[in-house]
Amino acid sequence: MDTKVKKILKYVLSFALAGGLIAYSCSKVDWSSFAKAMESCNWAYILLALLAGFVAMYFRALRWRLTIKPIAPSIKRMTAFHGVNIGNLSNMAVPYSGELVRCGVITSGTGAPYDQVLGTVALDRVWDLVSMFATFLLILLLGGGRFGEFIAGWVRDSFNASFLLIIAVLLVAGGAFVAAVALLRKRDNGIGRLCARIYKLLLGMWQGFGSCIRMKGKWLFVFYTIVIWGMYWLQSVCTINALGGVFGGLGLTDALCLTLIGSLASVLPAPGGFGTFHAIIQFALSSVYFQGIMALDKVAADSYGMTYAIMAHETQALGFIILGVFSLILLSVNKKKKI
């Protein structure tokens, strides 16, 4: 299949997934209940959530910069900040493209090897997974809140024999692929040259990933991570308080649970989390809180769940757009000054 056709097909499927999930979620909404919930919104809390998102992205840039410094010692804070912002903006259009785009921003700004910068992005994502697991442990430590049983059940159902078998097969297949690339790269033919390029990319990514070991300020890295997830938590707390008339029974632990549940939406290839975030948050709130605690009917529960999902996601999306446009304009102005 032609490369352009593959790209077009990938984008069409991504947007179709997002559109389908949004349509499915909205089909279960009573819009009069949605409007009633929106009427009680305290917009000062939404503004605070937006500002918390700005702080989180700045500290993401500071954390990423720590891992880049071993391969690009001269990297500036704003260069890393622009990379994060433009990457987030790109992800809203094309899923996963932001990881590649922000590497390009760093490479053009510092001259660091692209493949090694890509390795630091992989490290960044691994730490997101570690942070998610740490958040889960914190939720258990705090008692779980309204969502404790839901998350515990989800984890219990996921980590069964079939799930572990799939993980094992993927690890073996990945190891076999790397070994095959390493062996075939020395052949003097088309396959060998292709494998040599792949091997160079994998080697560069591994070197970038290893920058975590060489970086200075490891505890600072941990501190930045805590601040980032603290800001995510604050965003959830602010959204709950903004819609206090509906979500008055939710506490700090529940906000942390919503932060963790919402972060799972980034796994699916939908642009900017559109559709995936709305569907998973609506399901969680409807299934765990409203039906179980307030005993609302299914339509009202889904409507209130969608209210939270829209306010939380669109606040974050607005923040990504503002920061992304800001970075694009500033980089453009700086380039013109250099010319």
Image: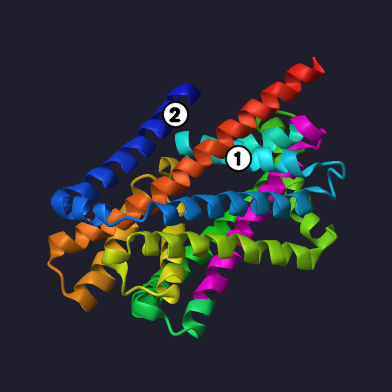
> What quarter of the picture does the C terminus occupy?
top right
Query: Does residue 279 appear to the left or right of 190 in the view shown?
Result: left
In the image, residue 121 sits, relative to residue 158, either above or below, namely: above
Q: Is residue 187 visible?
A: no
> What quarter of the picture does the N terminus occupy?
top left
Mark 1 crowd level (few <14, some 14–19, many ≥20, 10 Å Cα): many
Residue sitting nearer the eye, 16 or 90: 90
Residue at (19% x, 55% y) in the render: 36
Residue 320 percent location from the top left of the image: 52, 41
Query: Does residue 91 appear to the left or right of 249 in the view shown?
Result: right
Closest to the camera, between mark 2 and mark 1, is 1
Q: Secondary structure at mark 1?
A: helix
Residue 71 percent location from the top left of the image: 84, 45
Q: Spatial distance from mark 2 to mark 1, Cα to Cα?
A: 27 Å
Residue sitting nearer the eye, 243 or 9: 243
Residue 303 counted in the magenta span: no
Residue on which the image places disc 1: 85
Residue 115 percent location from the top left of the image: 73, 40
Q: Amino acid at mark 1?
A: Asn
Outermost residue toward the top in this view: 339
Residue at (70% x, 28% y) in the render: 189
Query: Does residue 189 appear to the left or right of 287 in the view shown?
Result: right
Residue 118 counted in the magenta span: yes
In the image, residue 332 sits, relative to residue 327, either above or below, namely: above
Q: Secondary structure at mark 2?
A: helix
Which mark sits nearer the N-terminus, 2 or 1?
2
Q: Is residue 61 visible?
A: yes
Q: Amino acid at mark 2?
A: Lys
Query: Does residue 16 appear to the left or right of 63 in the view shown?
Result: left
Residue range corresponding to the magenta coloring: 108-136
Residue on which the image places disc 2: 6
Quadrant of res 224 = bottom right
